[in-house]
Amino acid sequence: MCGDESDCKVNQKASGSRNNRIVIAVVSLVVVVLGAVLYAFYRNAQSDKEESAYEFALSSNDPQVLQNYLNTYTDAPEAHRDSISAHLEYFAQLDRDWTNVVVSGSKSDFQRYIEQHPNSPFCQVAQHKIDSIDWSRADAANTLEAVQLYLEQHPDGEHFDEATDKMKMLNANTVTPEDKILVGTVFDGLFQSLNNRDENGLMNSFSPLIAKFLGKANATRSDVVTFMHKIYKSDVASMNWMSLEDYAITKKEVGDQQYEYTVVFSGLQKVEHTDNSSSETRFRFNAKVNPDGRITELNMTKILE
């Protein structure tokens, strides 16, 4: 208890001051703890945000996204910043390599770029460039072999339709080895039939409609057989016709991939007579062969020596 009224007032005042200090201390402590907790939450949120941004940037192929990460997260973990910087340098190198390839314009350089940078966003452009280069070469060469090579190398090429049309056009105007074999077979068959006096074989060498035969228009197969009988005179013991295989062939498309052949060549006739004499005569032949491998025109003139 207080000794007097003044002492009680002093004691009460001192006690109240101590209580105030305690309250202030407790409040301050609570504020500090709360601030620390909030700061920890903030730091964790920032860390999670940085981690998400890092993963997004690392998976991106856009250099601007990578640079934005570096500009935004200047306090990010060093390992993250180093990784993003290396990724950014990789794309910068891609750009430098691509610029060099474009300046070169070489097919081999475009191919090498694709091999070295298979995941580059420029790979599709490089494939387009290679396709264009190969087509330009094939188109300029203007040969069946060159166009066929393009089609084989680029079955899904941008110029596939053009190449297919060009193949048809070239086929219509280019005499292929197969064409030469066909023509040779036709006239070998003709001469073999003449040598063997084979009427059926001879008629089968000709189309039923013969536009011209030895100057006669609209001839028939019977006219051809009649010719054979005329040349086998009574004094002929044997006869041998042969092509000299100097074929000059042109072709014309007369239907969808159907061709007519105009042929000029030399032939030799050897005759053994019944009196044991022999003779040789050279002829120049002008003929036409239809898509079925039948002769539709045949004329010949003696070559004077």
Image (tube, rainbow, N blue to C red):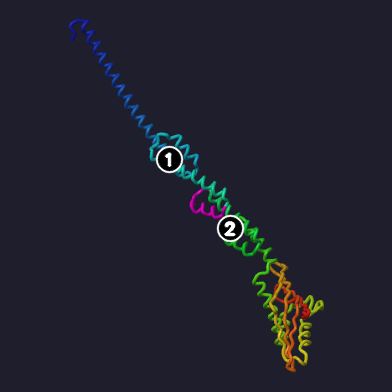
What is the quadrant of residue 234 in the picture? bottom right
In-front residue for pair 49/147: 147
Closest to the observer, 85 or 18: 85
The residue furthest front is 305
Q: Which residue is mark 2?
A: 156
- Give the amino acid at mark 1: Tyr
Q: Residue at x 30, y 19 (%)?
A: 24
Residue 35 image point, x, y percent: 35, 27
Specify whether 257 is left or right of 45: right
Looking at the rendering, the stretch of residues picked out in magenta corresponds to: 106-121
Q: Tell me if residue 200 can be seen.
A: no
Determine whether, in the image, residue 184 is placed left or right of residue 80.
right
Q: For mark 1, what is the residue?
A: 54
- The percent coordinates of residue 155 (x first, y second) are 58, 60
* The image quarter in which residue 249 lies: bottom right
Residue 106 lies, with reference to residue 3, above or below; the image says below
- Circle 2: residue type: Asp
- Kindly report the secondary structure that dominates the magenta region of the rendered protein: helix
Q: Is residue 122 visible?
A: yes
Callout count? 2
Q: CA distance from mark 2 to mark 1?
A: 39 Å
Q: Nearer the viewer, residue 151 or 265?
A: 265
Q: Looking at the rendering, in which quadrant would you find the C terminus?
A: bottom right
Q: Quadrant of residue 47?
A: top left
Mark 1 secondary-structure assignment: helix
